Image (tube, coloured by chain):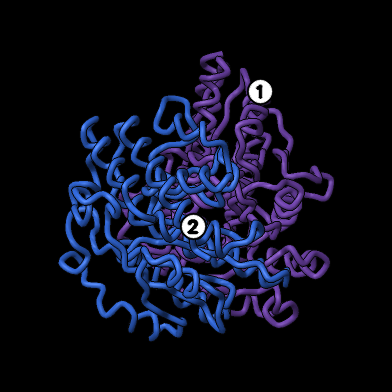
Chain colours: A purple, B blue
Amino acid sequence: MRNTFAEHFLQLAKADNRLILITGDLGYGVLDKIATEIPDQFINAGIAEQSMMSMAAGLASQGYRPFVYSIANFPTFRCLEQIRNDVCYMNNPVTIVSVGAGLSYGNLGYTHHAVEDISIMRSLLNIDLYSPGEPIEVQLCISDILELDRPAYLRLGKGGERALSSEQVGKTCENRQIRTGRDGYIAFTGGIGALAIEAHELLAELDICPSVISVPKLTRENIQKLNLQIANSHVLILEEHVLGGGFGSWVLEERENMRLQFLTERMGVDQSNKSILGSQRYLLEQSGLTADSIAAKFRSLLDLSRAKF
Amino acid sequence: MTKKSEDLAKRSRISTLKMVHSAKASHVGSSLSLIDILAVIYSEVADDSDAVLVSKGHAAAGTYAVMANVGKFPLEKLETYGMDGSTLGGHVNHTGNEGVWLSTGSLGHGLPYGIGLAIAQKRRSLGEKTFVIISDGECDEGTTWESALFAQQFNLNNLVLIIDRNRIQSLAGTEETLRLEPLLDKWKAFNWDACVVDGHNHLELEKSMQASYSPKVVIANTVKGKGVSFMEDSVAWHYKSPSDEELTEALNEIKGSKE
């Protein structure tokens, strides 16, 4: 997804000089073309994330559209107050591009994991959260960001994510139903979608066919729309994020606010094994996030739902 | 040519004292040390299109007092300072307040934000400038020194930083907290055009704040609580608000001063 971002950004920026890529000294091999082809729209701010974020806010206040690019923890936790005050409170249209969502940088260790970012970002003022699950969604999210004139948080995986949906699925970053079924729902946000699809395939072998919905733009409105669709059915919610304050937690809050009824199960990152190192897939496994366990969890949810209703 | 700014500073000190008295607010010392700097910027140095950022947001009373007295908003609005529902509170706030470029209150935000403004101004090539005022205690913040690197790297010769060097921070003196000296040498070592002036001498301030060949820093030696002898150079007046009697005494002293 980061390569899709870099390529798409370059094309858009060539036609719009308000777009500026600011990096916190990261992006080797990813941002090279941007740096060489549009040098006036590229700033390497060095290893100074806090000042980088405030500087981006200052630029955005003057009509520019800065995209601040860095890895997972750096453009988020490291400079949270700059995001809160200078970007969000001042309502400056900075786009934070966080590469390495969830456990993407598994082997680099706990310091480089971003599994609390949705929870933190969604409590801030004025900012829209984007969490694409496949390359096409990256493009849809960027289009939406540029159409709006607001702070944005774009949560990207590292790379190599495969396409999940066919071309027929919607052309906006509203909720995207990437599989249509009859046995309830699996809803996800971000790169965990690949496992959702694998689980969907395992379930199909058992003649169980849930709809699979990707939510690439996390807003209250989109979550309410999701809940209306799920109402009176059941949903398994997947995210590469801690359960507290994440996507699934948001769905539950809105379910209560809307006085809707549906059964839920949530699967996310378990931090009790936080000192273990390994690949993204290995670490997801440690949290019980495998296609097999997702399929099993959905089957038990389906049984529960059938017993209840 | 400083008569105008000196008169503005005097009126702003009177406003500030009345504001903090009526709101029972703190930070009067920080406001009084800043007022001459801001008065010179607003009345002698900055054009309307220039950006002025008060990064030491706790000096809000003094900042608003100068802004109102120079005509940025009505003087009557100052009477709402610190009241319920007012847009004028204990830290500089942009919402509802025309002319405020950045809400501040957490130190170390104004300079890097100002760098973003200065980059945008240079790209426009209209000769606009950015003025940022920080406190000397704010030099404890890492972003101050990150920004010191940024400004020289990006050749921001349209950026003027003024350090309100009153030598007192929240709990104690700056040198006994985290030693800043040699402060001038530090800025010179970061490739800034750096100078030291008397931060209450309007002529010196005005001369020092002209844009330069590189980012410019003016270390303005000031006295916390300047103008009211019993508030001067005192940690306590970072927090205290004047009583009725203290207000009268303070106003008499300001009104009796020759500036």
Which residue: 41% across, 69% down? A108
* Side (left or right) of A93 relative to B53: right
Calculate the distance from the C-alpha at mark 1 to the C-alpha at mark 2: 63 Å
Residue at 46 percent across and 81 percent down: it is B192
Q: Residue at x 50, y 52 (%)?
A: A83
Residue B141 locus on image (x, y percent): 34, 64
Q: Residue B4 placed where, x, y %?
A: 52, 56
Same chain under badges 1 and 2? The reply is no
Is B150 located above or below residue A98 in the figure? below
> Of the numbered discs in the image, which one, if any, rests on residue B5?
2
Horizontal arrangement in the rendering, residue A223 relative to residue A37 (left or right)? left
Q: Is residue B247 visible?
A: yes
Q: Quadrant of the C terminus of chain A?
A: top right
Q: Mark 2 lies on which chain?
A: B
Q: Which mark is residue B69?
A: none
Crowdedness of circle 1 by 10 Å Cα count: few (<14), some, many (20+)? some
- Who is closer to the viewer here, B29 or A261? B29
Task: From the viewer's side, name the closer residue of A144 and A134.
Answer: A144
Q: Where is residue A125 in the image (x, y as percent from the top left)?
A: 53, 40
Q: Residue at x 29, y 32 (%)?
A: B24
Pointer 1: what residue? A228
Give the SS element for disc 2. helix
The type of residue carrying mark 1 is Leu
Q: Check the image and report above or below for A105 versus A205.
A: below
Task: Please state which amino acid type lies under the numbered disc 2.
Answer: Ser
Answer few, some or many: residues within 10 Å of disc 2's Cα (few below 14, many 20 plus, some between 14 and 19).
Answer: many
